[in-house]
Image (cartoon, coloured by chain):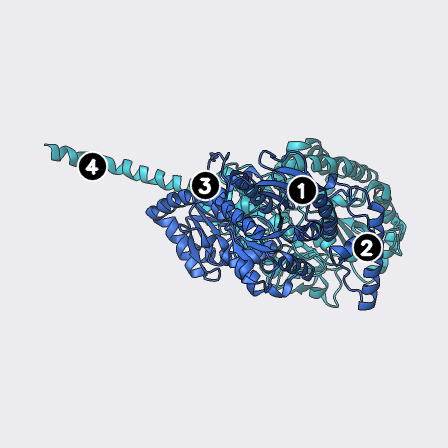
Amino acid sequence: MAKKSVCLYFQVHQPARLRLYRFFDIGKDSHYYDDFANRTILRRIAQRCYLPMNALLLEEIRRNPGFKVSFSITGTVLEQFERYAPEVIDSFRALAETGRVEFLCETYYHSLASLASQAEFVHQVEKHRSKISELFGVVPTVFRNTELIYSNAIGEQVYALGFKAMLTEGARHILGWKSPNFVYSCETKPRLKLLLRNWGLSDDIAFRFSDRSWDQWPLTAEKFIGRMKENAAEDEIVNLFMDYETFGEHQNAASGIFEFMQALPGMVINDGTFEFVTPSEAVKKHKAVASLDVPDAISWADEERDVTAWLGNELQQEAFNKVYAMTEKLSIVNDPVLWSDFGHLQESDHFYYMCTKFFSDGEVHKYFNPYDTPYEAFINYMNVISDFQIRLDEQRAALDVKEEAIKEATAAPAAVKKKAVKKK
Amino acid sequence: MRVLMFGWEFPPHIAGGLGTACEGIVKGLAYNGVETIFVMPSASGDEDQSCTRIINASDVPVDTVSTSVDEFLDRVKFVHIGTNMVPYADPEEFSRLVEEDRLRQVKDFSVSYGQKYKFSGKYGANLMEEVARYAMVGGTIALRHKDEFDVIHAHDWLTYYAGIAAKELTGKPLVVHVHATSYDRGSVDNIDTRVLAIETRGMQIADRVVTVSDLTRNIVINRYHIDPAKVVTVHNAVDFSGRENIEVSRGVREKTVTFLGRITFQKGPEYFIEAAAKVLKRTKNVRFVMAGSGDMMNRSIRYVARLGISDRFHFTGFLRGADVQKMFALSDVYIMPSVSEPFGISPLEAMRTGVPSIISKQSGAAEVLKYAFKVDFWDVDAMADDIYALLHYPALSAFSAKAGYDEVNALKWNAATAKLKAVYESVLK
């Protein structure tokens, strides 16, 4: 019997956090980012997670010929690496050179563009695809949308962009009785294959690993393989998708997470039930067992597994509408500096900070939130948007003046002639 | 003429408008030849004492009467107030808690008997306790300076018990000054009955009640049922001496319409938002700013978001010191849509900065300001009309800026306190 598959994918992202941007700054100061916080946090996570974990994975890949992983690294965090911790890029490059690490494509700015504007979505996907191939020398063929957001419509767009597979959440309300441990396909574009996150097993590592009140604590590699076998007894593939910051940041080094990850690859291979695959290998190896109909967007966030963490309340919807209302004007102005700010302002994190779901998931939201309240997040964001609008309008107006100047210039000779005639 | 005055705060360390008004009053009284001793719970030492003598209640040991604390409490007849709200306790449990608390506090009084009590002088959780202790210290101070004053003057409910104690212990006449009432602080069904009781008691015992506007005078007469004959209006004034016009550079090109104050029910923030939405339908060349904080702030933010105008409607949060002046200087129109405002000093500040102001007819300031635009707080159409007019007709805004500037400069405490002096004289007859 063929071996079952296990697919590891890690998400790497850090937002461009905004500085305290007051009403008095509007129209005066167009630097929006909290460089100090961004630098400090990035350097801290690089030391605690990215560098040690990359080293660990590199070592395990060298030791175990069958070990493979995949990453999706946002453009925003890549920019921060280049600026604050270039050694992290080098360590990812070393992983890429083993040939057993796959890099996925996503929106460059970790944005919600897939829900707003097709043109902007395509732009960001292309931008990310070229950034990844430029840095790591491979062109991604599998797509992963921000926060695993997926719907039929998004699937169609992704397929049109030339991807053969996409990752999303094994959301219970979509799957019903079905198991996430198979490959599925898009309802409307059946040639786009879907890999679904096994949230139970993924969260064993990402959320519960150091939870001492959990009956499975402490989680060992052996125990985890047992759980995988049990979970996928009749199935084909286990998809373990999680934030890369799980290792050393959300679960700290003292929890034993690094030892766990060191033991897992060798043990899975020796056990022989599973083999490691990358997402593109998975969709080659396994046939789609059925299509999945997802009319409304799903994601991997919160209990609801929908997009309400970013667009659930009126503050978020207002901010979202205001920012995407500018796309048309931006494409007319077409200024690289404005494009860059516009991209960073689209990061889903800004909307996440405005979330008012304070109950089951409020704690998680709070953990990642630089603001005391969603209202502060909203005010700060809208102040920045207001300044951005002013810059955009100024450039738009300047463009009109230019066009007029050109018109006048072309019309000028005729006018001069007329005058000359009159004078005579 | 000499006055023993009880206040709660005095510049430079102030939380609200009360301290500023008190400073204006003592300076004005000094100009009118009235000497004042100003008692406050917690003085910092950097108050301007050129016009008054400040007594810091925190420095005064309570050694008043030779009788016991219980007798003292009885003498000034104050109901001891439970300071801690205990939600979700059943009535029996609550009465037990209150009783325990009472015993503990009476004991505390005995312990601190003959000692100083360090007041915070703030508006914190133990406010009620501070108010009660202030009464004891106030009585002591009144006795000690018995021969140095003719009239007692107490500002707002926080100091009424102190005023009552002083009156009971010295037999001198008491004037209470109403800067705000419970009916201005919350909606009718949301009133702190403990505060209401103190206010009522103070006004009943006082020989004269001074109100900052006719609006407040009517509340005192109709809601507190005080004899109209003893209620006198003395409108507030404003002291702009030492004020320099600050220069600011504008970041935004659009005209700015500003609301500045606590964002609470009383200030009518939602009417401002509705008016803003109406104006924005006509013109995009304007920004609205709501400066301040308060319990209605989050609701206001959500409302603005729902109306889809948050790229033109900004919140600054609480502003302090120079930022307040800066905000006025950045404004083209000032608006105070208060549902109920005893006086409202902020439009005067705006007009002094040359900013035309729109104020609600339900504010005391509307009684004295001829050159402010007056609308009913609920009339958002009229509000929108006025905003639009001030933004688009330069002749109108230039005229009202100039006239308003002159008008508020003429509102002097010297004139207001002359009326106050007459009130003192009337109780001494």
The residue that mark 4 highlights is A415
The chain under label 4 reads A
- Number of numbered discs on residues: 4
Q: What residue is rendered at 43% in x and 51% in y? A: B369
Chain that appears blue: B
On the same chain: label 4 and label 2? no
Vertical position of residue B278 compared to residue B23: above or below: below
Q: Toward the viewer: B226 or B109?
A: B226
Tags 1 and 4 touching, CB below 8 Å: no
Task: Report x, y in % for residue A175.
Answer: 71, 65
On the question of residue B173 being in view, the answer is yes
Q: Residues within 10 Å of mark 3 (few under 14, many from 20)?
A: many
Pointer 3: what residue? B353
Q: Nearer the viewer, residue A45 or B393?
A: B393
**Chain coloured cyan: which letter?**
A
Q: Quadrant of residue A127?
A: top right
- The residue that disc 1 covers is B147
Q: Which residue is mark 2?
A: B70
What residue appears at the point 50 percent right and 43 percent down from the top-left corner? Answer: B413
